[in-house]
Image: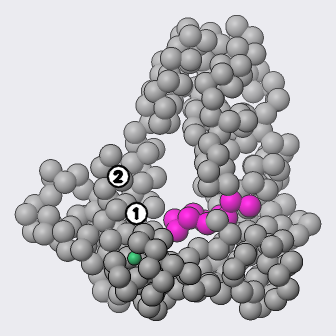
Amino acid sequence: MDQGITTLLTLEGWQVIGVEETARGWAVTVDAPRPARCPRCGAIRLHRHGTLPARAVPHLWIGVHPLMLTWVPRRWRCAACRQTVCPQPAGLRPWQRWTPAAQEAALILLRAASFRSVARRLGVTDSRLRRLGDRVVPTADSTWWDHPGDLVLSLDEHSFRGQDLLITVALHAPDRRLLAILPDDRLASLEAWLAALPEAVRTRIRAVTVDLKRAYARVVRRWCPHGQVLADPFHLIQDAHRRLDDIRRLEQAEARTTIPRWPLVKGYEHLTSSQQAQLAEIQRRWPALGQRSHLKED
Ligand SMILES: [Zn+2]
């Protein structure tokens, strides 16, 4: 297809093999390029190494009609270092359910409207948007503190376009909703947002869950004198498990075998010796799973 179209769709190097109108919008079927070289060692000899089950993810919107990207992930193996490569379209990470462009579109809409209305406009379910949106949303709405009683906030880091980090602020109680998308992940931005709240509101903040960065906690303590800072390890572990399990199921489908789940999700010290042996075998045969499992332990 015309080079300009693939650029427009942020699909450089990919081949568009079909565009189809669906009940909700558009489906664009694409095919992965052969990687020019191994990302690990730079060798240029890569062999075909099978395919994974077909995927479909929201990518862009044409007007109000979602454009789904569909493709069959192809895997390649480096002849020199045995690294497997599986090209992903449009900046997608293997475990992501939305492309960065889709995330950006949803973020922008969510700044101005409620979850439900955005979900309806984008043609996705509430819960689908919520999975993205647990880390996202609108700002400059000062009615959220009108409810009487204690307020609970949560701070999350959000990776935007797969690289820039930004902070999102969400209300967890009395109701759940996203309050702000800060422009970046700088402490000064968080501090400015908190400092802009009336003091009477800040003193009603009873707890703040803080994802990842400890320094955020210091800023919260300074501006929310009655706010208890809670780490959110449960959320982090759950998220890591979910991503790991997505990869496990993809590998399992491809290998047409069962990859046991427990050795991957249980803490290493709690594994029986036969589970430890299973884990070593998984790490040897499916390096991507081994890597995810290390990340989780960190
Ligand atoms: Zn290599």
Residue at the left extreme, as displayed: 273
Give 158 or 260, whichever is nearer the viewer: 158
Image quarter for ligand 1 equals bottom left
The residue lying at 13 percent from left, 69 percent from top is 277
Q: Residues within 10 Å of mark 1 (few under 14, many from 20)?
A: many
Is residue 3 found left or right of 261 in the rendered image? right
What is the number of the mark on residue 163? none
**Residue under the image location 85 percent in, 78 percent down:** 5
Q: Name the residue rendered at 77%, 91% in the picture.
A: 18
| Disc with the residue nearer the chain's start (1 vs 2) | 1
Residue 296 circle label = 2
Horizontal arrangement in the rendering, residue 84 relative to residue 24 (left or right): left
- Residue at (47, 36) in percent of width and height: 212
Q: Secondary structure at mark 2?
A: helix
Distance CA(mark 1)–CA(mark 2):
9 Å
The three-letter amino acid code for the residue at tag 2 is Lys
Residue 93 shows up from this direction: yes
